[in-house]
Image (cartoon, grey):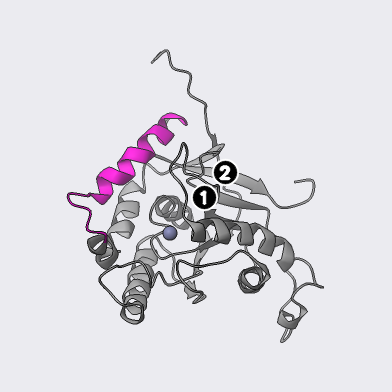
């Protein structure tokens, strides 16, 4: 249909890979835009693991961090299970006050070296979600640390203390993909796995209740941003990704 409005098309992401590692700041980050894509990939037989930099323990106003941490880790494990992800690692860094820097890169590089993924996924780490909707500080710190840690992981002279008991450098990451980026050039068709994405988000029940957003509906929310993305790739629902190539000459 000719709408008269130029919409910029989004390229489908490549699917010729076997292992992905998703590194995000908080439980619930994957579910606000990435989980349905993960469900598609695991349905194709790919292996996907999650790594949470924090446990989101500062995320519920009415619940103290020590209790909140336990609740949110359990919700994240269930949420991952729904989209075919059996493994969730928690790095237990401090929620809300993450700092970009060498210590964070070290933590993430260790996970990349152990898991040896071809693709690393993180959430949008641009300053905004588009327009003046500011991104959150932990997301920005995490994403910047992820792209650097992927390079660190491949260099045997960086974080040498990790290279014991047979652990080797890993330079096999082809790209970092950041979902939800306002500068997305690619997308994943999530039409068939959209419902799993919704279920995966709804698994964060205590968190969603804790937000206290009246009449908020996870399905409606996800539809609201998946539909325009889908339009840009000619499908019902899509998830947008910005692509950062990590290999040389790739
Ligand atoms: Zn978050």
Q: Residue at (62%, 63%) from the top-left corner?
A: 117
> Does the magenta portion include 192?
no
Task: Say left or right for 244 vs 78.
Answer: right
Magenta highlight range: 211-233
The residue pinned by badge 1 equals: 124
Mark 2 burial class by Cα count in 10 Å: few <14, some 14-19, many 20+: many
Say which of 164 and 138 sits in front.
138
Task: Say left or right for 124 vs 65.
Answer: right
Residue 28: quadrant of the picture: bottom left
The residue pinned by badge 2 equals: 242
In the rendered structure, are the residues bearing label 2 and label 1 in contact, judged by CB atoms less than 8 Å apart? yes
Image quadrant where one finds the N terminus: top left
Mark 1 burial class by Cα count in 10 Å: few <14, some 14-19, many 20+: many
Task: Say left or right for 183 vs 161.
Answer: left
Query: Is label 2 in a helix, a strand or a loop?
Result: strand
Residue 64 position within the rendered picture, expressed as x and y whole percent measured from the top left: 31, 77
Query: Is label 1 in a helix, a strand or a loop?
Result: loop
Residue 165: quadrant of the picture: bottom right
Residue 138 position within the rendered picture, expressed as x and y whole percent measured from the top left: 50, 61
Which sits earlier in the primary sequence, circle 2 or circle 1? 1
Q: Quadrant of ligand 1?
A: bottom left
Q: Is residue 148 visible?
A: yes
Dominant SS in magenta: helix
Up/down of 228 relative to 61, above or below: above
Say which of 146 and 49 sits in front.
146
Task: Say left or right for 213 vs 83.
Answer: left
């Amino acid at each position: 249909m000719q709408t008269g409005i130029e919409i910029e098309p989004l390229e489908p992401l490549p699917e010729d890979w076997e292992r992905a590692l998703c590194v995000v700041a908080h439980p619930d980050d994957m579910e606000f835009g990435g989980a349905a894509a993960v469900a598609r990939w695991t349905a194709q037989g790919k292996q996907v693991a999650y790594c949470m930099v924090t446990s989101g323990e500062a995320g519920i106003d009415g619940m103290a961090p020590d209790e909140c941490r336990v609740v949110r880790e359990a919700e994240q494990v269930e949420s991952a299970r729904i989209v075919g992800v059996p493994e969730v690692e928690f790095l237990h860094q401090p929620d809300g006050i993450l700092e970009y820097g060498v210590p964070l890169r070290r933590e993430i590089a260790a996970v990349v070296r152990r898991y040896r993924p071809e693709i690393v996924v993180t959430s949008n780490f641009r300053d905004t979600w588009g327009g003046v909707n500011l991104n959150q500080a932990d997301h920005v710190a995490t994403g910047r640390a992820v792209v650097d840690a992927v390079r660190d992981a491949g260099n045997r002279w960086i974080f040498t203390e990790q290279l014991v008991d047979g652990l080797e450098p890993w330079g096999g990451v082809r790209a970092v993909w950041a979902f939800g980026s306002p500068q997305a050039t690619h997308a994943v068709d999530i039409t068939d796995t959209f419902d799993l994405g919704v279920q995966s988000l709804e698994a964060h029940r205590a968190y969603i209740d804790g937000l206290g957003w009246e009449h908020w509906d996870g399905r409606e929310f996800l539809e609201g941003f998946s539909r325009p993305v889908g339009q840009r790739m000619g499908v019902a629902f899509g998830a947008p990704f910005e692509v950062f190539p990590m290999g040389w000459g790739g």
